[in-house]
Image (cartoon, rainbow, N blue to C red):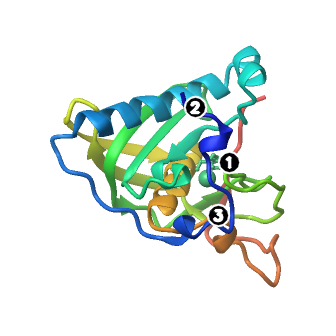
Amino acid sequence: MITMKDIIREGHPTLSLRAEEVAIPLSDENVKLMKEMLLYIKNSQNEAFAQKYNLREGVGLAAPQLNILKRIMAVHTEDEKGNLHSYALANPRILSHSEEMTYLPNGEGCLSVDREVEGLVPRHRRLTVEGYDINNKKVRLRLRGYVSIVFQHEIDHLNGIMFLDRINKENPMAPIPNSKPVEFEE
Ligand code: SB7
Ligand code: NI
């Protein structure tokens, strides 16, 4: 089982490196990794479980955060309308994105960053992503808003980029041109 002790933190050199594509069809080892990563996210969202095993809650995870330089990621979260998005993908690739941008008004966090960081992170509002699921099936996803942000955060990890790198250093709260913030329904 993956726990917080498996997750490397800010400053670890692996977090700045580009991860390698994995072979398709997936090896048993890589399928196992994808399942375990998705399970971590699900477990972390179960309050009793998270408390028992000291898991920090997350909505996504990328293999480099486990010090594994493979292009594998998982996401498990609800969108703005309450629809569940649950994916484990290998070799995810952004096929296209909107020019229009979006951001989370309260900024982003990361399981590899043990502090609160203030600042807006500019993200594309819409994405088309392609990747392989655990059955070696090629999947194409059209994503928008919050889920699109989470995907960009995870794909950034595969490219050695942290959300911190995308915050405006002179003025972290500077407005993001051509953007609409993510709004959750209360
Ligand atoms: C806020 C949080 C995340 C993505 C986008 C906005 C994911 C946090 C967990 N991770 O560190 C995954 O890389
Ligand atoms: Ni992260």
Where residue 5 is drawn, which disc sits there? none
Question: Distance from label 2 to label 1 (Cα)?
Answer: 11 Å
Q: In terms of sequence position, does the residue under pointer 2 or pointer 3 come before the other?
A: 2
Q: In terms of sequence position, does the residue under pointer 2 or pointer 1 come before the other?
A: 2
Q: Residue at x 36, y 54 (%)?
A: 71
Q: Residue furthest top?
A: 48
Residue 110 location, x and y as percent? 68, 52
Quadrant in the picture for residue 97: bottom left
Q: Give the class, few, some or many, for how many residues have Cα within 10 Å of label 3's Cα (few <14, many ≥20).
A: many
Q: Residue furthest front?
A: 5
Q: In this view, does 183 lie above or below 65?
A: above
Quadrant (top left/top right/bottom left/bottom right) for the C terminus: top right
Quadrant in the picture for residue 27: top left
Beta carbon of the mark 3 residue lies under 8 A of ligand 2: yes
Residue 149 location, x and y as percent? 57, 52
Left or right: where 91 falls relative to 27: right
SS state under label 1: loop
Q: Which residue is drawn at 61% across and 69% down?
A: 178
Q: Residue furthest bottom?
A: 170
Front-most of residues 26 and 162: 26
Q: Residue at x 76, y 19 (%)?
A: 52
Mark 3 = which residue?
163
Mark 1 = which residue?
111
Of circles 1 and 3, the one toward us is: 1
Q: Which amino acid does label 1 sit on?
A: Leu
Mark 2 = which residue?
41
Question: Distance from label 1 to label 3 (Cα)?
Answer: 11 Å
Quadrant in the picture for residue 79: top right
